[in-house]
């Protein structure tokens, strides 16, 4: 469960990115976050995994209070929340296997359970046969699928996907969407910031529209609602 109450985020340069935002997201929901560039979507997303700290307000994610959480406990939050980025952020000198295993090694999982889980998530994203390849040997869509596999390796309760189809062609975007749907169907809460109007309009889920740092529309089975 994610709860934000009257949240503000003001940057040192004086820009207020989040301006009195309140929302509640229940376990297992699939939520799109939409809105024009500069509306506050990225800041909203980053506050959930504490990449950004709110200036004031209340933010609770699972059992974590993000306004009072100690720095030493942020890694525990990030086991609870997996993140997929638009630009993949794979480690170039590690193989597919090593990229995913690394996410589990940092939380001190044992080698046997790491091997089992890496193969499980590669099966889910359909890339078990690329296990020994390096990122530069993969297409953009394959790299994004590996990034998703890495993000779910530690079975997070929440998966955040920040523009996961932003750098991909339409066919590949639909493949990525199918994987996110499957992860959602397994009970993971999925929050996806996107400019992809076609996906939002076809694959219906709750839509949060952010403008000027506020949620201006919260619609179950919503549409994208902006000019594409």
Image (tube, rainbow, N blue to C red):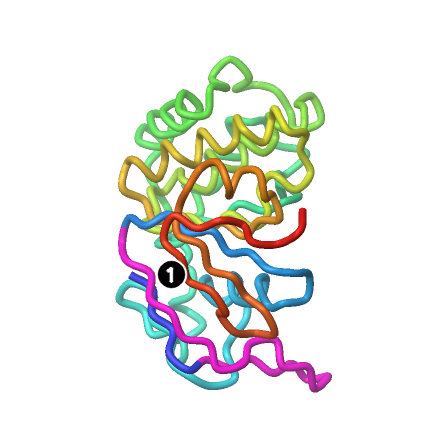
Is 206 or 94 nearer to us in this picture?
206
User: What residue sits 47% from the left and 65% below the top?
Assistant: 217
Q: Is residue 123 left or right of residue 136?
A: left
* Residue 142 in picture, x, y percent from top left: 59, 25
User: What residue sits 32% from the left and 44% below the top?
Assistant: 188
User: What residue sits 42% from the left and 82% below the top?
Assistant: 6
Does the magenta segment cover residue 113? no
Q: Is residue 45 above or below residue 55?
A: above
Residue 62 found in image quarter: bottom left
Is 174 or 222 nearer to us in this picture?
222
* Residue 139 in picture, x, y percent from top left: 67, 24
Task: Find disc 1 in the rendering and name its residue.
Answer: 77
Within-10-Å neighbours for mark 1: few <14, some 14–19, many 20+: many
User: What residue sits 48% from the left and 82% below the top?
Assistant: 20
Residue 92 found in image quarter: top right
* Residue 212 in picture, x, y percent from top left: 61, 74
Q: Is residue 80 above or below residue 153?
A: below
Does the magenta segment cover residue 8? yes
The region drawn magenta spans: 7-27
Q: Is residue 85 left or right of residue 59?
A: right
* Residue 131 in picture, x, y percent from top left: 52, 19
Q: Residue furthest top?
A: 129
Q: Pick the quarter of the image with the N terminus.
A: bottom left
Residue 76 found in image quarter: bottom left
């Amino acid at each position: 469960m994610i709860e934000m109450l009257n949240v503000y985020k003001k940057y040192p340069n004086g820009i207020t990115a989040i301006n009195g935002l309140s929302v509640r997201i229940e376990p297992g929901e699939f939520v799109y976050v939409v809105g024009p560039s500069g509306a506050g979507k990225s800041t909203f997303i980053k506050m959930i995994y504490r990449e950004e700290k709110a200036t004031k307000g209340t933010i609770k994610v699972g059992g974590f209070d993000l306004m009072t959480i100690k720095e030493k406990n942020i890694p525990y939050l990030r086991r609870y929340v997996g993140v997929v980025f638009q630009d993949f952020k794979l480690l170039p000198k590690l193989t597919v296997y090593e990229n995913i295993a690394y996410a589990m090694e940092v939380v001190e999982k044992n080698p046997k359970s790491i091997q089992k889980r890496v193969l499980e998530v590669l099966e889910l994203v359909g890339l078990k046969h690329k296990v020994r390849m390096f990122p530069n040997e993969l297409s953009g869509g394959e790299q994004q699928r590996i990034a998703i596999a890495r993000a779910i390796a530690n079975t997070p309760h929440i998966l955040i996907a920040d523009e996961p189809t932003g750098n991909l062609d339409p066919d590949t975007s639909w493949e990525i969407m199918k994987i996110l749907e499957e992860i959602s169907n397994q009970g993971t809460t999925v929050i996806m910031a996107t400019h992809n109007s076609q996906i939002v309009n076809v694959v219906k889920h709750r839509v949060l529209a952010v403008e000027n740092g506020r949620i201006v529309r919260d619609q179950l089975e919503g549409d994208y609602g902006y000019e594409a």
